[in-house]
Image (cartoon, coloured by chain):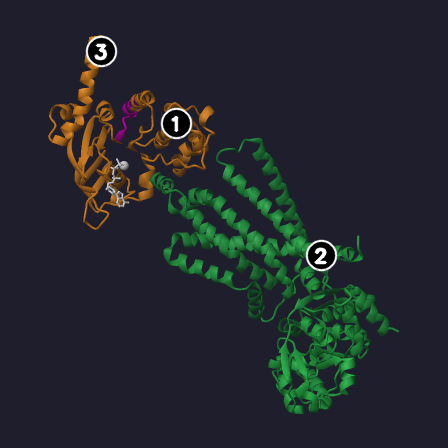
Chain colours: A orange, B green
């Protein structure tokens, strides 16, 4: 359960707001898609949830806890985070990267090892083959999967993902989206996924928040966005995938 | 193999050990001090600028000056300790700078990821930033290692054994073989150390990708073997050596090397063990003898009179000798064991035929002729007290006063370009060019009687004093000049000169 109340962030003492007056909440077990153009404040919003950025004003609650009142390191260890730039440790192997958070949490070695195997298998990178590799020995897509595995490893119930599937080819991407959606449903995870890709948001998210210039323009289920866009901008964003879907359907029927 | 080379190689194990020990200890301490400082600087803007400025300034100081300052700060202590302190100071810049750079160049997104998964700042430092900065830090250590090996040669000047002993002895005694052996040995040590650390650096760089390749394993094996060998050798070197009975000191010129060697030979013949620390400056040597780090060396009355007692008048040879003897005894309990007989003072010298032609025997004979004579002095003579007293005592001035490098000065008088020069009375070149020393009946030149200055500890040993006394007043100006000439002009070895003096003393 994540709740944002009047959250604001300025990097220039109030001249401009990277995130302005943002409030929304994500229910337990819900997957929220956060979508918007480049620079609209998605990453900044996400980072304020685990205090990688401190809010200029407003409050954030995770599982009922005010994050500003909790120890930031402990908070971060209990929230899975997938970084926009992947952010794997280049001097750690795949297995060591995945084991990093459980080790910080003080799990015993055996449990860490088992969990490592489990999560790597979930993202389709069997530990026997990939565990000992370094990130420089992986493709961009494989690195992203390790990033996802690392976020899952400590069994958090809240996961924040910043464009986790950006570097994947369409087929792998679709597979991983489905795979992740399945994991999320099974484990009843509370997730925010930041994305540029409306189709991805529509297909994965329970609800979608559309951001522009630091503000959330509309938040709602995929159906609501598709059928009742409240802004010209939102309409433009959902129109594209809709038109494509229509064209595809025509293609299918014309043959 | 030439005798000279063989003589040099006999010294190699000792000098190698001294040099390696200096380098490894200084480098290790430098690393232990500099990395934390670098980490501190990388984390605090307030620390960074002043610290980097400070270590850079240290670096711009001439290394000899740093050595001298450390010795002074330690109250005149010589040997390993001041040398190591100076080397550590010198090694800091590259390590501190590279630690800062290395830490700062770790990609921001990696540091952010470390924060994002919940690492504390300490964990980020030790688990992420330092390991990633390691190749850069090691590159800094590598630079420091090469510098340290080079600068360590200067440790000879403060009485620590190193390859510098070859170089300074060689320079002072015109022994090119010695200089070459010392320089090559230092260069070789620098190359080997550089390669080993370079190997470690390569390993840390490759670790992320190629840790399973064969080359990686080979390099790892070589590096580990080399480090173990070097480590155990220096640990072995650190084992306390039986301390020599006496430490003989010496300044950095031929005469000093010869007399120190002579003292060593005499003491060893009597069954004592000795250590020679040659190549130091007067101040350092004098304080080291006062505090007992050095037991005996060859000093000159005029030097103590003018440079240590800060006198600027000349009461005559006898009074100076007596005052100096009282002074060293009274202040630091040192003993003037006795004069050796020769002086090493300034004197006017002329070519024999020219002196005869003009009828000059003493400076008094010059007075009427002076405005037709061309004089040549070394770089400092005409600025020294000696010249002022000479001029005033005899009321004399020369038609021309030229200043030369001392080697050129001797050539000039020999070739008749100048009439007279300001020679040193025990200089071998006086003998080589067969010059005539002009008498100084009014004692205008400060006397520089050579004498053996001994520490209070050594002076308590009767046997030691006895042996030293067999040398008293045994060496004349002429004989010391001849010994110096053998080395400086004929290129013979210092041991040849020692042997020559021994035949004179024990005849
Ligand atoms: N540390 C910072 N200092 C100053 N400005 C910042 C900082 N981080 C972000 N910004 C600014 O805040 C705004 C929002 O940035 P943010 O990274 O949240 O965008 P985003 O929606 O994630 O964009 P993208 O899709 O390109 O990742 C941008 O204008 C950006 O320049
Ligand atoms: Mg972003």
The image shows residue B37 at horizontal and vertical percentages of 46, 55
Q: Chain of mark 1?
A: A
Spatial CA distance of label 3 from label 2 is 90 Å
Closest to the observer, B484 or A244: B484
What residue range appears in magenta? A181-193
Q: Residues within 10 Å of mark 2 (few under 14, many from 20)?
A: some
Closest to the observer, B355 or B11: B355
User: Mark 3 or 1 closer to N-term?
Assistant: 1
The image shows residue B63 at horizontal and vertical percentages of 56, 63
Residue B442 placement, left or right of B501: left
Which quadrant of the figure shows ligand 1? top left
- Mark 3 vs mark 1, foreground winner is 3
Closest to the observer, B11 or A98: B11
Q: Residues within 10 Å of mark 3 (few under 14, many from 20)?
A: few
Spatial CA distance of label 3 from label 1 is 33 Å
Residue B151, quarter of the rendered image: bottom right
The residue identified by callout 3 is: A252
Residue A59, quarter of the rendered image: top left
Q: Is mark 3 within 8 Å of ligand 1?
A: no
Q: Residues within 10 Å of mark 1 (few under 14, many from 20)?
A: some
Please tell me whether residue B32 is drawn above or below residue B211 in the rendered image.
Answer: below
The residue identified by callout 2 is: B14
**Residue in the picture at 57% in, 46% down:** B197
């Amino acid at each position: 359960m994540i709740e944002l109340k009047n959250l604001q962030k300025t990097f220039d003492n109030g001249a401009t707001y990277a995130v302005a007056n943002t409030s929304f909440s994500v229910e337990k077990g819900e997957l929220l898609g956060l979508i918007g153009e480049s620079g609209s404040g998605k990453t900044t919003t996400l980072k304020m949830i685990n205090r990688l950025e401190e809010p200029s004003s407003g409050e954030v609650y995770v599982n009922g806890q005010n994050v500003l009142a909790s120890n930031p390191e402990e908070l971060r260890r209990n929230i899975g985070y997938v970084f926009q730039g992947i952010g794997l440790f280049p001097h750690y192997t795949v297995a060591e990267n995945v084991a990093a958070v459980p080790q910080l949490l003080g799990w015993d070695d055996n449990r860490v090892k088992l969990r490592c195997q489990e999560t790597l298998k979930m993202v389709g990178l069997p530990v026997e083959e990939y565990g000992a590799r370094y990130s420089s020995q992986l493709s961009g897509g494989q690195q992203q999967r390790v990033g996802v595995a690392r976020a899952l490893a400590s069994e958090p119930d809240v996961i924040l993902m910043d464009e986790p599937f950006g570097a994947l080819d369409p087929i792998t991407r679709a597979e991983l989206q489905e795979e992740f959606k399945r994991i999320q449903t099974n484990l009843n995870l509370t997730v925010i996924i930041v994305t540029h890709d409306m189709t991805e948001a529509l297909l994965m998210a329970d609800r979608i928040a559309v951001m522009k210039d630091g503000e959330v323009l509309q938040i709602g289920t995929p159906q609501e966005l598709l059928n009742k866009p409240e802004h010209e901008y939102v309409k433009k964003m959902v129109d594209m995938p809709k038109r494509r879907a229509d064209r595809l359907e025509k293609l299918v029927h014309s043959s | 193999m030439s005798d000279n080379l063989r003589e040099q190689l006999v010294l190699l194990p000792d000098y190698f050990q001294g040099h390696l020990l200096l380098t490894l200890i200084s480098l290790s301490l430098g690393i232990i001090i500099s990395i934390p400082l670098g980490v501190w600087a990388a984390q605090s803007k307030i620390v960074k600028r002043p610290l980097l400025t400070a270590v850079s300034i240290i670096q711009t100081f001439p290394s000899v000056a740093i050595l001298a300052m450390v010795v002074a700060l330690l109250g005149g202590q010589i040997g390993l300790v001041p040398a190591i302190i100076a080397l550590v100071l010198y090694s800091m810049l590259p390590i501190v700078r590279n630690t800062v750079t290395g830490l700062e160049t770790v990609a921001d997104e990696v540091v952010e990821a470390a924060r994002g998964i919940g690492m504390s700042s300490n964990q980020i430092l030790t688990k992420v930033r330092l390991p990633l900065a390691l190749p850069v830090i090691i590159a800094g250590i590598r630079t420091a290692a090469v510098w340290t090996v080079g600068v360590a040669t200067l440790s000879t000047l403060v009485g620590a054994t190193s390859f510098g002993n070859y170089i300074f002895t060689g320079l002072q005694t015109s022994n090119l073989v010695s200089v070459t052996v010392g320089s090559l040995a230092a260069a070789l040590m620098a190359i080997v150390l550089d390669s080993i650390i370079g190997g470690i650096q390569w390993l840390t760089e490759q670790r992320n990708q190629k840790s399973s390749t064969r080359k990686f394993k080979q390099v790892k094996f070589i590096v580990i073997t080399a480090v173990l060998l070097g480590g155990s050798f220096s640990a072995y070197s650190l084992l306390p050596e039986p301390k020599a009975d006496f430490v003989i000191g010496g300044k950095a010129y031929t005469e000093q090397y010869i007399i120190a060697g002579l003292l060593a030979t005499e003491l060893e013949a009597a069954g004592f063990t000795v250590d020679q620390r040659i190549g130091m400056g007067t101040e350092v040597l004098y304080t080291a003898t006062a505090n007992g780090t050095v037991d005996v060396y060859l000093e000159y009355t005029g030097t103590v009179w003018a440079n240590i007692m800060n006198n600027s008048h000349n009461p005559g040879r006898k009074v100076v000798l007596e005052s100096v003897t009282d002074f060293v005894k009274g202040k630091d309990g040192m003993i003037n064991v006795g004069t050796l007989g020769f002086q090493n003072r300034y004197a006017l010298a002329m070519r024999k035929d020219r002196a005869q032609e003009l009828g000059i025997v003493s400076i008094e004979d010059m007075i009427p002729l002076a405005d037709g004579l061309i004089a040549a002095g070394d770089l400092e003579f005409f600025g020294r007290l000696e010249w002022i007293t000479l001029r005033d005592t005899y009321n004399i001035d020369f038609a021309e006063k030229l200043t030369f490098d001392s080697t050129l000065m001797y050539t000039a008088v020999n070739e008749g370009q100048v009439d007279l020069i300001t020679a040193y009375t025990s200089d071998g070149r006086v003998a080589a060019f067969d010059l005539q020393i002009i008498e100084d009946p009014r004692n205008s030149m400060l006397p520089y009687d050579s004498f053996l200055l001994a520490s209070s500890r050594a002076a308590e040993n009767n046997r030691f004093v006895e042996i030293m006394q067999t040398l008293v007043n045994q060496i004349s100006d002429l004989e010391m000049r001849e010994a110096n000439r053998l080395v400086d002009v004929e290129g013979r070895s210092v041991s040849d000169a020692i042997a020559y003096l021994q035949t004179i003393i024990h005849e």
